[in-house]
Image: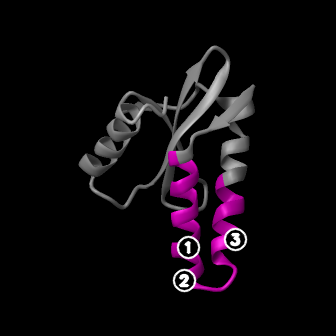
Amino acid sequence: MKIRILTSAIDDLYAGRVFYEKQGEGLGEYFFDTLFSDIDSLSLYAGIHPIRFGHYRLLSKRFPYAVYYLLEDGVVIIRRVLDLRQNPRQTRRRLIYSEESGQV
């Protein structure tokens, strides 16, 4: 299955990478590699995850992050990659903001 990552998700990944790199040298790169591995798994397992806030939600295996995605015409569209340690209202707001900005 084809995977498309929106700019909003790339920005989320970059912010997470910067945060974890500040925590320890090399940790940001490990975060990035781990999340991309999780995203790659969607080529096989897209659509089996629970739906939260109108999006499928894949939980990262190593970090407290979730990949929010949609399925459209056989394409996995990664909308956001968000830190789960935030308030769920903030998560919902970020997902709605992505829709309103035309990044669907």
Gap in angstroms between the C-alphas marked 1 and 2:
6 Å
Left or right: where 85 falls relative to 70: left
Q: Earlier in the sequence, mark 2 or mark 3?
A: 2
CA distance for labels 1 and 3: 9 Å
Query: Which segment is the magenta one?
Result: 8-35
Which numbered disc, 1 or 3, marks the residue that appears first in the sequence?
1
**What residue type is disc 1 on?**
Val
For label 3, the SS is helix
Residue 11 spot, x, y in % from top left: 53, 55
The x and y percentages for residue 3 are 69, 33
* Type of secondary structure dominating the magenta stretch: helix
Please give the residue where the numbered disc 3 appears in the rendered image: 29
- Residues 9 and 55: in front is 9
Q: State the residue position of label 1.
A: 18
The quarter of the picture where residue 39 lies is: top right
Q: Which mark is on residue 88? A: none
Q: Is residue 1 left or right of residue 64?
A: right
Mark 2 is surrounded, within 10 Å at the Cα level, by few (under 14), some (14 to 19) or many (20 or more) other residues, namely: few
Instruction: Locate residue 90, reporting x and y percent.
Output: 28, 51
Q: Mark 2 — residue?
A: 22
Q: Residues within 10 Å of mark 1 (few under 14, many from 20)?
A: some
Residue at 57 percent across and 62 percent down: it is 14
Please identify, in this view, whether the residue under mark 1 or under mark 3 is nearer the observer: 1
